[in-house]
Image: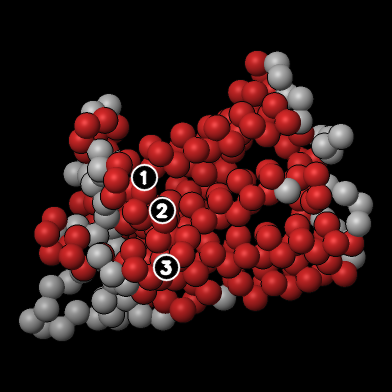
């Protein structure tokens, strides 16, 4: 494996960042340029057949010479969904004043999704470029993971996570917030599958790149999540109750 210096990593993020990120912001303010239909196609298959989404990765590289999406429609629509979900939770838990609503939206959108996404994408981008790249042969092109592609992977992984732990959980709140063992079991199973989806799709995203190896390492956290959720059931720690108390300080009455 070839050593990667800071300057090489910096040039990699520059290639994927300076060129693509401004394009992202430009297209956000030009709605007709967004491919909404294709975005919903991606969202559908991320929930039911995520491997199909990443079969198009090579095609995207061949046609646009980049692994990352240049269309911000996915992020834009996901942010809208999260905004609606945050408002719904705030109303449900009687967070009706302006400050509480802004606080809920800020935490769910800017902390849970954007800030965590930036950190996770940067870690994934660095680790894969530093440790997982296959050494380039003499007559092959030296390739690297684009930072924006790493952020795409986070966004893709987050969507089924959002469906399970924002949408499904919302409609099951009357059941999940009860004091029964069954509510704890259902809640912890939901959180387990939410994280399993996240790490599985993360693995698929990096595994789709032909110049990476050992990407199965992205599945290792699932064992830790499983252990944590099982212990939660054994000791009757309802993760939904824990999360709702953290955000709202109260349980649904």
Image quadrant assignment for residue 144? bottom left
**Which of the two labelled residues, at mark 3 and mark 2, occupies the earlier sequence position?**
2
Q: Position of residue 78 (x, y in %)?
A: 45, 42
**Which of the two labelled residues, at mark 3 and mark 1, occupies the earlier sequence position?**
3
Q: Position of residue 196 (x, y in %)?
A: 58, 67
Q: Secondary structure at mark 1?
A: helix
Spatial distance from mark 3 to mark 2, Cα to Cα? 10 Å
Q: Report if the CB atoms under discs 3 and 2 are less than 8 Å apart.
A: no
228 vs 9, nearest the viewer? 228
Please give left or right for residue 120 compared with residue 87 in the image: left
233 vs 110, nearest the viewer? 233
Q: Position of residue 160 (x, y in %)?
A: 52, 56
Spatial distance from mark 3 to mark 1, Cα to Cα? 17 Å
4 vs 19, nearest the viewer? 19
**For residue 85, above or below residue 16:** above
Disc number for residue 74: 1
Other-residue count near label 1 (Cα within 10 Å), few / some / many at <14 / 14–19 / ≥20? many
Disc number for residue 49: 3
Q: Report if the CB atoms under discs 3 and 1 are less than 8 Å apart.
A: no
Q: Secondary structure at mark 2?
A: helix
**For residue 167, above or below residue 233:** above
Identify the residue at image location x=37%, y=66%: 205
Asked whether the viewer can see residue 181, the reply is yes
Asked whether the viewer can see residue 232, the reply is no
**Which of the two labelled residues, at mark 2 and mark 1, occupies the earlier sequence position?**
2
Identify the residue at image location x=24%, y=81%: 135
Q: Quadrant of the C terminus?
A: top right
Other-residue count near label 2 (Cα within 10 Å), few / some / many at <14 / 14–19 / ≥20? some
**For residue 9, above or below residue 3:** above
Q: Nearer the viewer, mark 2 or mark 1?
A: 2
Residue located beneath label 2 in the image: 43
Other-residue count near label 3 (Cα within 10 Å), few / some / many at <14 / 14–19 / ≥20? few
């Amino acid at each position: 494996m070839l050593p990667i210096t800071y300057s090489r990593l910096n040039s990699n993020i520059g290639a994927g960042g300076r060129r693509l990120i401004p394009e992202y912001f430009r297209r956000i303010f030009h709605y007709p340029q967004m491919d909404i239909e294709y975005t919903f196609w991606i969202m559908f298959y991320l929930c039911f057949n995520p491997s199909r989404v990443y079969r198009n990765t090579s095609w995207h590289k061949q046609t646009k010479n980049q692994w990352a999406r240049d269309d911000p429609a996915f992020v834009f629509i996901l942010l809208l969904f999260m905004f609606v979900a945050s408002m719904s939770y705030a109303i449900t838990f009687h967070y009706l004043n302006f400050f509480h609503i802004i606080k809920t939206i800020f935490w769910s959108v800017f902390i849970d999704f954007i800030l965590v996404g930036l950190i996770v994408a940067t870690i994934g981008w660095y680790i894969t470029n530093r440790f997982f790249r296959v050494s380039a042969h003499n007559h092959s092109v030296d390739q690297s993971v684009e930072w924006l592609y790493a952020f795409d992977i986070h966004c893709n992984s987050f969507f089924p996570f959002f469906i399970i732990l924002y949408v499904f959980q919302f409609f099951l709140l009357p059941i999940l917030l009860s004091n029964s063992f069954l509510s704890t079991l259902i809640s912890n199973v939901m959180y387990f599958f939410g994280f399993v989806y996240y790490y599985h799709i993360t693995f698929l995203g990096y595994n789709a790149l032909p110049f990476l190896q050992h990407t199965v390492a992205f599945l290792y956290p699932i064992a830790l999540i499983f252990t944590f959720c099982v212990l939660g059931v054994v000791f009757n720690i309802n993760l939904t109750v824990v999360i709702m108390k953290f955000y709202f300080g109260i349980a649904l009455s």
